[in-house]
Structures are given as C-alpha cells and as structure tokens.
Amino acid sequence: MDLSVIVAVHNEVENIAPFTAEIRAALDGKLEFEIVYVDDGSTDGTAEALVEARKTVPELVVFTHEKRSGKSRALIEGIRRARAPTIVTMDGDCQDNPANIETMWAQVTKSGQADPKVVVCAWRRNRRDSWWRKFISRIANRIRAGLLGDKTPDSGCGFKMFNRDAFLELPRFDNMHRFLPALFLKYGCEITSVDVHHRPRAGGRSKYGTLDRLWVSVWDLLGVMWLQRRTTYSVVKEKD
Ligand SMILES: Nc1nc2c(ncn2[C@@H]2O[C@H](COP(=O)(O)OP(=O)(O)O)[C@@H](O)[C@H]2O)c(=O)[nH]1
Ligand SMILES: [Mg+2]
C-alpha cells in the first residue's frame, strides 16, 4: 500500500458520503490506498454514515472514540493504525480538495520513491472562510513562523503529507496538529508547502470558536518553544 488518508471528524454527518466518494475517485487506479476515518465521539450519526459509506467505498476503515478527545488525539489514533508508510491528513468538511493529493504525492516522491524525510504542507492561498477566520489564522500562522521558525506559511492547515514512522517519533500532545512543521523540523525532516485549492464548507458547522482557539494556541506555543529547546535529534550510524 502507498498511502493512508487520515480524516478526523466530529459531527460531520452531511460530509461523510460526498467526501469519502471524492477521495476514492481522486486516487482510484493511481495509488494503492486506504481511507481511515476517526470519528471522535460524534452525536449526529457520523459513525452510522461512515458504516453506510463503507458499502460503496471498500478502502474505507472506520474507528470511533467513545468520547470526544480532540483532533490531535483522533489523528494520532488513526495514524497509529494506518497501514501505509505515507500519510496524508485532511479535514472532513470537504474544504480540502482530494485532487491536490496528487500534487503532494509528486513532492514526496520526487526522488523516485516516497522520501521519509519530506513533509508537504498545503498552502490555502485562496482560503474560503470568513474574513475574520482568515485574519485570526493569518496572525496565528505568522506568530508560529516567527517564534518557532517553522518555515510554513499555512501551518494551521490540516492538509499535510508525511512519513508515518517520522510522525510516530514526535512528542504527542493535545493540539499538536497545529505545530507539526515545527516538530518535524526538529526531528530532521525537510518541509515544503504546495498551493492547494480550498473550498467553502459544504455542510455542517465549524467546531472552533476563533478567540478560544487563539487563546489556547498561546499556551501551546509556549510549550512547543520549550520542547524545541529540549529536543536533540541526531543521525545514528553503526560503525563497521
Ligand atoms: N477528531 C476531531 N475532529 C475535530 C474536532 N473538532 C473539529 N474536528 C474536525 O477538524 C476538521 C476541521 O474542523 P472545522 O470545524 O472545519 O475547523 P475550521 O476549518 O478551522 O473552521 C473537521 O474535519 C472537523 O470535523 C474534534 O474535537 N475532534
Ligand atoms: Mg473547516
């Protein structure tokens, strides 16, 4: 298998059928893949919709959390259970376009095969959210880039491709998904961003209040700055 697509969702019932079908259509015949959904304690019938979608999307694997545990935890559990060496994470609200997976795959496999050190981040230049959401997110991205040196213009974007083992080396904590470029860099990976197509939310509602997200991010930022200073990474070679 080449690629595991990981989608963490909370209350996205309307988006399950269209998005799983769209991912399948984008990859079918091009790559060997699976689509791993982690339903994070949804209360709107998301889990049932996923079971239903499995009838027409045989590559779909579904996990559920009994209790809502947050997006990072859901992504971690999905990635841990993924079967392919390369992972792509996507939001489950149909805003990310599965057609862009190919562009990211081309970056990761530039050397002829999937490079475990390459991390590809999506860059939503034409982001289709409210001006307020875009404004707050631009500030958050700039602060992260300035304080962490994460070399990523859209670090908060949930659409990213990377090596599974490289991810499982990283320290794990709630909200880590917003800091992946900074963490990967510290662990010897190389980061690139590619332009992607972004779309308005197809159905359902956004799960985050903007100001509480910003506030939580300040706290997390301090933690990641500490982690950066306390992380040493070295390449180990066995002597002949
Ligand atoms: N697993 C999990 N996923 C979540 C949670 N909150 C949001 N998500 C998912 O994260 C993705 C992006 O969320 P969204 O509300 O659209 O955020 P926005 O795009 O920044 O407005 C969607 O797939 C959501 O279902 C959560 O608590 N747990
Ligand atoms: Mg969204």
Image (cartoon, helix red, strand yellow):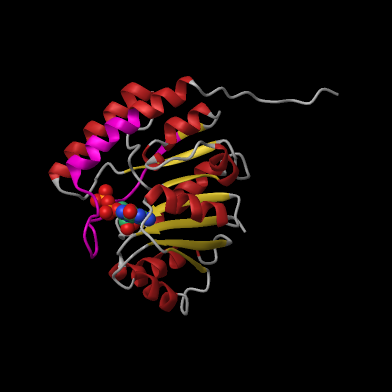
Q: Residue at x 52, y 74 (%)?
A: 58
Q: Say which of 223 and 204 sits in front.
A: 223
Give the quarter the ligand 1 occupies. Answer: bottom left
Q: What residue occupies the far front of the structure in this picture?
A: 67
Q: Is residue 200 left or right of residue 2?
A: left
Q: Say which of 74 and 110 sits in front.
A: 74
Q: Position of residue 175 (x, y in %)?
A: 37, 42
Q: What residue occupies the far right of the structure in this picture?
A: 240
Q: Say which of 172 and 149 sits in front.
A: 172
220 part of magenta stretch? yes
Q: Position of residue 45 (x, y in %)?
A: 32, 73
Q: Residue at x 45, y 51 (%)?
A: 75
Q: Position of residue 165 (x, y in %)?
A: 60, 43
Task: Kindly indicate the quadrant of the structure image that contains residue 123.
Answer: top left
Above or below residue 122? Residue 83 is below
Q: Which residues are magenta?
A: 192-221
Residue 100 in view, yes or no: no
Residue 109 in view, yes or no: yes
Count of residue discs: 0
Q: Position of residue 145 (x, y in %)?
A: 33, 27
Q: What residue occupies the far top of the structure in this picture?
A: 229
Q: Quadrant of the N terminus?
A: bottom right
Q: Residue at x 24, y 41 (%)?
A: 213
Q: Residue at x 15, y 48 (%)?
A: 130
Q: Quadrant of the C terminus?
A: top right
